[in-house]
Amino acid sequence: DYDELSQRSDEIDTKKENALLREIVLALKDKIAEDNLPGLAAPQLGYKKRVLVVNFKGKLVSYVNPVITGIKGLTVSNEQCPSFPGKKFIRPRNNEVAVMFQDPMGKTKSQKLVGLAAYVFQELVDHLDGLLLPDVGFEVDDDFYAAPEDERWEVIEAYLKSLDINLNHVE
């Protein structure tokens, strides 16, 4: 439910809560495989913990207590979320993100994600923070995509301006 999803998730202790962590990771991986999703965050399955899994072309990678430590580039991403079926949004996203996280064994790691992987990761971190696409994304429908490109860009420009994002910074 919307109220549940809009709450910030808690960090998980990889040592003291390892059984719960394993349960969450398995549930996320099963759901991703079952529905062929690009990724999923624990709150989307009812767990209020900072755990997410990203699907890299069939290789499922777990991120525990992830933090975005650096960003680069900005684009407008077209997004859909399984938590809001049938809805489409546009949302500014960074083209590159540097991240720090723990693996399920508690080992600290860092990684750089680019393009689609970066967009998916950012959307899942939003879920961990209780920030949902309907809150910050701009909902669009098929009429939006059928409109001429210059009209679509007018709408996108107004949306970005409302977020204090300068269009010159968008690639």
Image: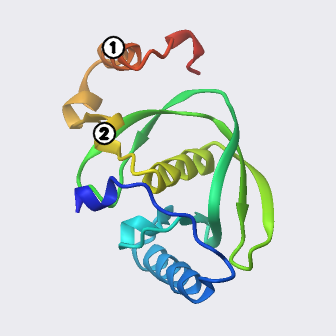
Identify the image quadrant of the C terminus.
top right
Give the structural element (helix, strand or loop) at label 2: helix
User: x, y (%) of residue 166?
Assistant: 51, 11
**Location of residue 151 with respect to 47 vertically, above or below:** above
Residue at the location (49% across, 68% down)?
Answer: 49
Left of 110 or right of it: where is 83? Answer: left
Q: Which residue is mark 2?
A: 135
Residue at the location (40% across, 44% down)?
Answer: 79
Left of 14 or right of it: where is 142? Answer: left
Of residue 88 and residue 111, the one placed in the foreground of this image is 111
Give the structural element (helix, strand or loop) at label 1: helix
Residue at the location (63% across, 42% down)?
Answer: 115
Q: In terms of image quadrants, where is residue 3?
A: bottom left
Disc number for residue 117: none
Which mark sits nearer the N-terminus, 2 or 1? Answer: 2
Q: Which residue is mark 1?
A: 158
Three-letter code, disc 1? Ala
Instruction: Determine the CA span between mark 2 and mark 1.
Output: 16 Å
Decide: few, some or many residues near mark 1? Use Cα within 10 Å; few <14, some 14-19, many ≥20. Answer: few
Residue at the location (57% across, 80% down)?
Answer: 21
Residue 85 at least partly seen: no
Left of 35 or right of it: where is 51? Answer: right
Looking at this rendering, what residue extends furthest in the front direction?
Answer: 16
User: x, y (%) of residue 44?
Assistant: 38, 66
